[in-house]
Image (cartoon, rainbow, N blue to C red):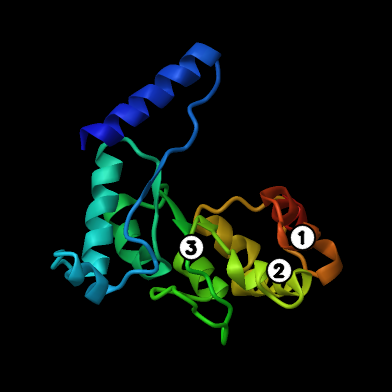
Amino acid sequence: MPMLASQVAAAAEGAEKRGCTRPKLLAVTVLTSLDDADLAAVGQSTPAEAQVVRLAELAQSCGMDGVVCSAREIEPIRQACGKDFVLVVPGIRPAGADHGDQKRVVTPAAAITSGASCLVVGRPITQAADPQQAAAGILAEIAGAASEKALEAQGVKVAGGMHKFDASEVDVHGGNATADDFLDAFGM
């Protein structure tokens, strides 16, 4: 995939010119709003899981640092690409939450225990009646999913240890939380 390799080269060149570290580069695999039937409808006969793993392997071979994928594919990607390959996981829905247009979803706890590097959580917070409480609940679920030791064993950086979360710890700016809001809530 020459396009991915050229992006990696351009990012490295730009970082070198600026005297900084090359940013992590991620490739998108199969959207979590698609399932096997959707792929078949556009002429892709390969099941979603196999297609995601194939795309992850291609991305890694081009020098990408990781992929965006469903948590359902974490285990086979880890087997194919190793523990240091970054896996950014959207399609996160708390237990019992509406899936909306997402078809390949998992809970925050399931994604963390499966080995996700980073979770992308949008509508379960932004469309909640109480976004602050929704964010706090998701953070509590993440915290309860694994101990600091288990997270570190999976290669996830834990700074300052895990702690219990209170809704008042997360300022979601009217439903528009920043990454810093969540990192602050984790003490990172």
Where does label 2 land, which residue? 135
Question: Residue sitting at 74 percent across and 70 percent down?
Answer: 131
Q: Quadrant of residue 163?
A: bottom right
The N terminus, quarter of image: top left
| 145 displayed left or right of 81 | right
Of the residues shown, which amino acid type is indicated by label 3? Answer: Pro
Q: Secondary structure at mark 2?
A: helix
- Report, in whole angstroms, how far the alpha carbon at label 1 lies from the one at label 2: 8 Å
Could you tell which of marks 2 and 3 lies nearer the N-terminus? 3
Q: Residue at x 30, y 63 (%)?
A: 76
Q: Secondary structure at mark 3?
A: loop
Q: Nearer the viewer, residue 187 or 35?
A: 35
Query: Mark 1 or 2 closer to N-term?
Result: 2
Q: What residue type is disc 1 on?
A: Val
Q: Which residue is mark 1?
A: 172
Query: Marks 2 and 3, Cα distance to the nearest angstrom?
Result: 15 Å
Q: Is residue 15 at all visible to an observer of this figure?
A: yes
Q: Quadrant of residue 140?
A: bottom right
Q: Which residue is mark 3?
A: 90
Mark 3–mark 1 Cα distance, whole angstroms, equals 19 Å
| Residue found 54% across the figure and 60% down from its top | 119
